[in-house]
Image (cartoon, rainbow, N blue to C red):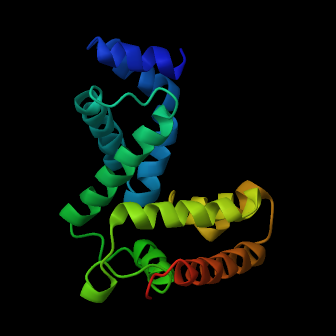
Amino acid sequence: MDDREIVALFWRRDETALHECAAKYGSRLRALAYGIVGDLQTAEECENDTYMAAWSAIPPHRPESYLYAFLARITRHISLNCCRDRSRLKRSAHLCQLSTELEQCIPAPDDIECRIDEMSLRQAINGFLGTLSAEKRNIFLRRYWYMDTITDIAKRFSVSESKVKTTLLRSRKQLREYLVKEGYML
């Protein structure tokens, strides 16, 4: 079943939409959640919570052409909230490392001088991602959106861990330069 049909089921409030989402995207959403929470049972809970959040969000949203991205964003937020709720975020070395890697590129939301409109920053980051080659963009997204480990990224793209680290380092530097050029104070 394609995404348009699944969204149509949501709009008709047909519970089959939940089963179709699970069949089509369940394993990917669960893997995304697992990468964040590090526990299979919690990842399954996050996946199920995603379907319920989607049920509430569709309608009014109509993500016919980007259903997976819509669901993945929900899953990611639920998973991160789960970490916060369980006080695991501070103790999770993996998440702390990712935060440290990007904190020098993106303005801190708590700094009044750096406070900017979230939509504007999102557009700037999307603009930056558009300047990267497909491989660099995919490595960047696997690391900072999907929170994959360096080892997992290297295996996925059949490259060395050293190449992944170097690509990420250079991409972060480019992101910083891009944001400064766009007028963001870092």
- Looking at this view, name the residue that lies furthest to the right: 159
Decide: is 119 above or below 24: below
The percent coordinates of residue 167 (x first, y second) are: 72, 75
Displayed quadrant of residue 119: bottom left
Q: Which image quarter: residue 116?
A: bottom left
Q: Nearer the viewer, residue 17 or 44?
A: 17
Q: Is residue 87 above or below residue 157?
A: below
Left-right relation of 3 to 56: right
Residue 29 rendering spot, x and y as whole percentages: 45, 41
In the image, what residue occupies the spot 38% across and 54% down?
39
In the depicted structure, whether residue 75 falls above or below residue 147 = above
Residue at (48%, 19%) from the top-left corner?
A: 4
Most foreground residue, 37 or 175? 175
Can you tell which quarter of the image residue 164 is in?
Answer: bottom right
Image position, residue 154 (x, y; %): 72, 64
Q: Residue at x 53, y 78 (%)?
A: 179
Residue 82 shows in the view: yes
Query: Could you tell me which residue is drawn at 56 percent across and 82 percent down?
Result: 176
Q: Report x, y in % for residue 9.
A: 36, 13
Q: Is residue 148 visible?
A: no
Report the side of 52 relative to 138 (left or right).
Answer: left
Q: Is residue 130 left or right of residue 97?
A: right
